[in-house]
Amino acid sequence: MEEDRLGEEAAKLLHDDQQADLARIHEIKVREVELAAARDAQIRMQMDANVAAEVSADVPLVNTAV
């Protein structure tokens, strides 16, 4: 009986540890996605600014020189 109880406690502790590990991994992945989204937004804003500068400078967006 005591061995069964100890085995069940050990299994529960292992399960709890695994759940905590999964929660930490999930948090890391969420942060990675948030950082990637922020970088993407920054890149898109810079690209928009570049296009706006080209348009206002009357510079062709496509190289037409042949």
Image: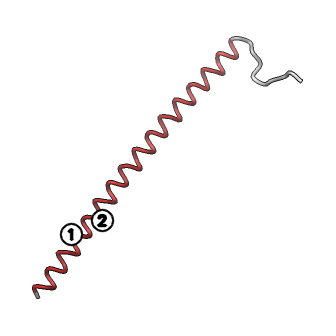
Where residue 29 appears, as percent x and y from the top left, is 41, 50
Residue depicted at x 21% and y 69%: 13
Disc sitting over residue 18 in the figure: 2
Q: Is residue 24 left or right of residue 5?
A: right
Residue depicted at x 31% and y 59%: 21
Identify the image's colour scheme: rainbow, by chain, secondary structure or one colour.
secondary structure
Quadrant hosting residue 34: top left
Disc sitting over residue 51 in the figure: none
- The residue carrying pointer 1 sits among few (fewer than 14), some (14 to 19) or many (20 or more) residues within 10 Å by Cα, namely few
Where residue 42 appears, as percent x and y from the top left, is 52, 29
Where residue 15 appears, as percent x and y from the top left, is 26, 69
Query: N-terminal of the two: label 1 or label 2?
Result: 1
Q: Quick check: 19 above or below 32?
A: below
Q: Is residue 60 left or right of residue 6?
A: right
Q: Quick check: 54 above or below 14?
A: above
Residue depicted at x 61% and y 26%: 47
Q: Is residue 43 left or right of residue 11?
A: right
Q: Which residue is mark 1?
A: 13
